[in-house]
Image: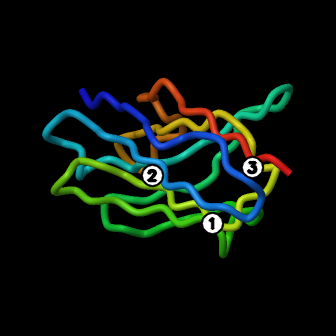
Amino acid sequence: QVQLVESGGGLVQTGGSLRLSCAASGRTFSNYVMAWFRQAPGKERELVARITSGGTTYHQNSVKGRFTISRDNAKNTVYLQMNDLKPEDTAVYYCAAKATLAVQKYNIWGQGTQVTVSS
């Protein structure tokens, strides 16, 4: 079973950058679909980006061109590079994993890391 630990959140001004990291334990990390979700106060959790075991990526329209998901299987880590941050990006960001794209729900979650963008 994979376990996930996020890091890299913090407070940043509008237009700034942050890189989130998600360190995974477990020898099967490279086989998993990895994703970043976020949840803002009073809103539902939403998918921000995902990356398959083969490296195919998906980014939500609101972050395209600003955020980039990547993975380093040698380091058992997935990243979310966030550039040109906006106040509406403020949320708790969660790393998640599931076995394959065919599986609907992500069943492995990290504890979350807070990202706050000041105007």
Q: Which mark is residue 83?
A: 1
Between discs 1 and 3, the one toward the N terminus: 1
Spatial CA span between label 2 and label 1: 27 Å
Q: Is residue 33 left or right of residue 92?
A: left
**Pointers 2 and 1 in contact (C-beta within 8 Å):** no
Name which quarter of the figure residue 41 lies in.
top right
Classed neighbour count for the residue bearing mark 3: other residues with Cα under 10 Å, few (<14), some (14–19), many (≥20): many
Residue type beneath disc 2 = Leu
Look at the image and tell me in which quarter the N terminus lies: top left
Residue type beneath disc 1 = Asn
Q: Which mark is residue 89?
A: 3
Between discs 2 and 1, the one toward the N terminus: 1
**Residue at x 74%, y 66% (from the top left corner):** 61
Q: Nearer the viewer, mark 2 or mark 3?
A: 3
Q: Is residue 6 left or right of residue 64?
A: left
Residue located beneath label 2 in the image: 101
Task: In the displayed orientation, state which residue is furthest to the bottom.
Answer: 65
Question: Residue 103: x, y in percent?
Answer: 46, 41
**Residue at x 86%, y 26% (from the top left corner):** 42
Q: Is residue 35 above or below residue 104?
A: below
Question: Residue 9: x, y in percent?
Answer: 55, 40
**Residue at x 27%, y 31% (from the top left corner):** 2
**Residue at x 22%, y 33% (from the top left corner):** 25
Q: Nearer the viewer, residue 76 or 104?
A: 76
Spatial CA span between label 2 and label 3: 26 Å
Name which quarter of the figure residue 84 lies in.
bottom right
Q: Is residue 99 left or right of residue 9?
A: left
